[in-house]
Image (cartoon, rainbow, N blue to C red):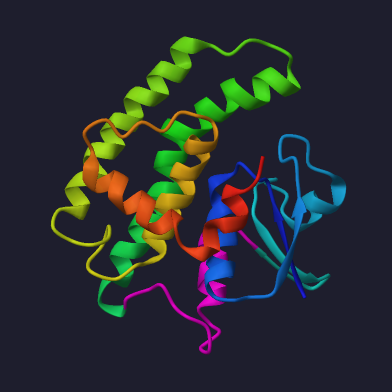
Amino acid sequence: MYTLHHYFLCPCSRFIRICLEEKKFKFKLKIENYWDPNTEYLLMNPAGFSPILYQDINKYIVGSNVIIEFLDEFKDLQSFFEESKRHEIRRMVNWFEYVFKKDVIDPILFEKIFKRFEEKKNPDSKKIRNALENFKFHLSYFEYLIDENDYLIGEKISYADLFFASSLSVLDYMGELNFRDFNKVKNLYFKIKSRPSFKNILNER
């Protein structure tokens, strides 16, 4: 049995949870407060970020990019890499893991959750507004990517779409998801979050 070390509002962690659910991969969850990692966690990943997929003392896979490559080695499990679009899917996975997370999710998460509950301070509304302005740029880009397709990349659901919906679900949880006039993005988000793999995440409070 594998254990997924995660933080429930980390978009990368949510992404891997969804991937594991989609692939019917058996696992259990262990929450990690990554702003205050314990020694055991740091021995697995000195950088301290999540997620980590752990099997035993000699086998742990660190980071969402690495975990999806590991999962694709199981040929009997569904893959979300369309072979002809594999590189573009990887590019968008990186986009959500690094660019979108840094521009949008991290500042809002810090101001609304960490700062309020861990530091007992009021959020900085200017920083939240700046992050939401960044969000508008990303929404425009996603709208452009979808165009006439059913998904972000082509006509089949991919890891890019799962990471897209996992990331937006964090904003949804924090009450900061506003699609404005971005109807293609809105429709894609609701299509993916209605999948059974999202049920447990969406029920969390």
**Left or right: where 5 falls relative to 156:** right
Front-most of residues 115 and 203: 203
Name the quadrant containing residue 63.
Answer: bottom right
Task: Evaluate whether residue 173 shows in this view.
Answer: yes
Please, is residue 110 above or below residue 100 in the view? above
**Left or right: where 83 falls relative to 59:** left
Residue extent of the magenta highlight? 62-82
Please, is residue 159 above or below residue 131 in the view? below
Q: Residue at (40%, 40%) from the top-left corner?
A: 100
Q: Residue at (54%, 46%) from the top-left corner?
A: 11
Q: Position of residue 171 (x, y in %)?
A: 48, 35
Please, is residue 70 above or below residue 48 in the view? below
> Quadrant where the N terminus lies?
bottom right
Residue 149 included in the magenta stretch of the image = no
Q: Residue at (58%, 13%) from the top-left corner?
A: 123
Name the quadrant containing residue 81.
Answer: bottom left
Q: Position of residue 60 (x, y in %)?
A: 72, 67
Please, is residue 47 above or below residue 77 in the view? above
Q: Residue at (27%, 30%) from the top-left corner?
A: 180
Q: Position of residue 28 (x, y in %)?
A: 75, 65
Q: Residue furthest bottom?
A: 76
Q: Position of residue 17 (x, y in %)?
A: 60, 60
> Quadrant where the C terminus lies?
top right
Number of marks present in the image shown: 0
